[in-house]
Amino acid sequence: MGQKVLVTGGAGYIGSHVTKKLLAQGFEVVVYDNLMTGFREAIPAGALFVQGDVRNYRLLSETMQTYKIEAVIHFAAKLLVGESVIDPYSYYDNNVGGSLTLATACRDNNVKKIVFSSTAAVYGDANAASGGLVNEDSITEPLNPYGQTKLMAEQIFKDGHVAHDLNYMILRYFNVAGASLDGSNGQRTKMPTHLIKIAAQVALSERPNLQVYGTDYNTPDGTCIRDYIHVEDLADLHVLALQHMNMGGGPEIINAGYGRGFSVFDVVNTIKRVSAHDFEVILSGRRPGDAAVLIADSTKAKKILDWNPKRNDLELICRSAVEWEMRMLRLIPFITEPAALNNRSTIL
């Protein structure tokens, strides 16, 4: 029998990809998701499913006891930078409150291993002097409540390590994008904010135009520069992080990015090229909370976890995103159909 892993937010974009990787590696997976932004059909066949909110201590604890959970991978969170500026309290409630509830349930049920989905937003713009290249020891000064809540959640798990022997692997994501190369899974978000997905939708006429926020940054073309990581490479990193703890490693904080940045216009031009469609781009002012440049120093991931990303190519990432949108529109067939709604699942 494989190790029993609870994946909070496992019906979401990244969580469902990680769940599939875990199952392929022989882990037994219980997905725990309230389906507010996740999708039941994204959960791979073979995973158990519990519908619940990460702030519900009783249900979390019952789930851990019922399925004899041995480790947790924690994705469940609110994720929108702009929304966090407008409605910060809901982000503190969900992201900080939910992480505290989960950590408490882990303590009370003797679950000693957690992989946490954090974000490069914890760095903010404080590392401009280094050209936006950040390592895990770089200054953390979030520019928005979303980043602040993730940094606070990191501290919860750090304190849990000291007080309760909770081992952790904190993965600070850069800009996750793309879709499964087998065509089975991608970003289903109803109201996406990710540049590559939105640009793919515009290229396929699902949206009338693409807005670019800020063209006066101190970058070569004036637009923000980000480190885009393919979702399957990120999923591989989660499995490696869990295996690292299983072999006695941790705790660690690890950047999840490739170490190379692309501007907004780089992405726009790549989407136009791979989709063979031109589209309207509207230039707008800066959004509050956006850093000019964020690029990962990924040395630690490669050294400690022996991470060897296989999809480090902006064109491949953009093409997979466009093809996923085409599949969602039934313009091309799914290579592998998404998991059926009646996959093996249980709701407490």
Image: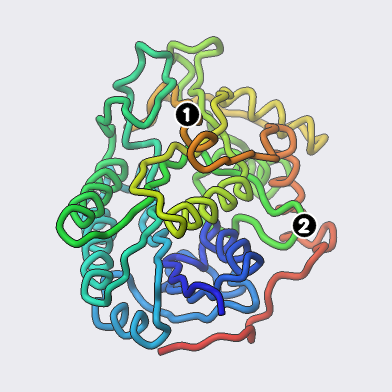
Q: Which residue is mark 1?
A: 296
Q: Looking at numbered disc 2 in the image, what kind of residue is underneath it?
A: Asp
Q: Residue at x 22, y 69 (%)?
A: 107
Res 315 quadrant in image: top right
How crowded pointer 1 is (Cα within 10 Å; few <14, some 14-19, many 20+) is rated as many
- Residue 120's x, y, as percent? 40, 36
- Residue 320's x, y, as percent? 73, 46
For residue 287, side relative to residue 337 (left or right)? left
For residue 185, side relative to residue 182 (left or right)? left
Mark 2 residue element: loop
Asked if 270 appears above or below 153 in the picture, the reply is: above
Give me the C-alpha separation between circle 1 and circle 2.
27 Å
Res 28 quadrant in image: bottom right
Asked if 223 appears above or below 165 in the picture, the reply is: above
> Could you tell me how many numbered marks the image carries?
2
Q: Residue at x 39, y 13 (%)?
A: 130
Asked if 26 appears above or below 261 in the picture, the reply is: below
Q: Which residue is mark 2?
A: 182
Front one among 210 and 308:
308
Q: Earlier in the sequence, mark 1 or mark 2?
A: 2
How crowded pointer 2 is (Cα within 10 Å; few <14, some 14-19, many 20+) is rated as few
Front one among 229 and 326:
229
Asked if 233 appears above or below 327 in the picture, the reply is: above
Res 277 quadrant in image: top right
For residue 242, side relative to residue 153 (left or right)? right
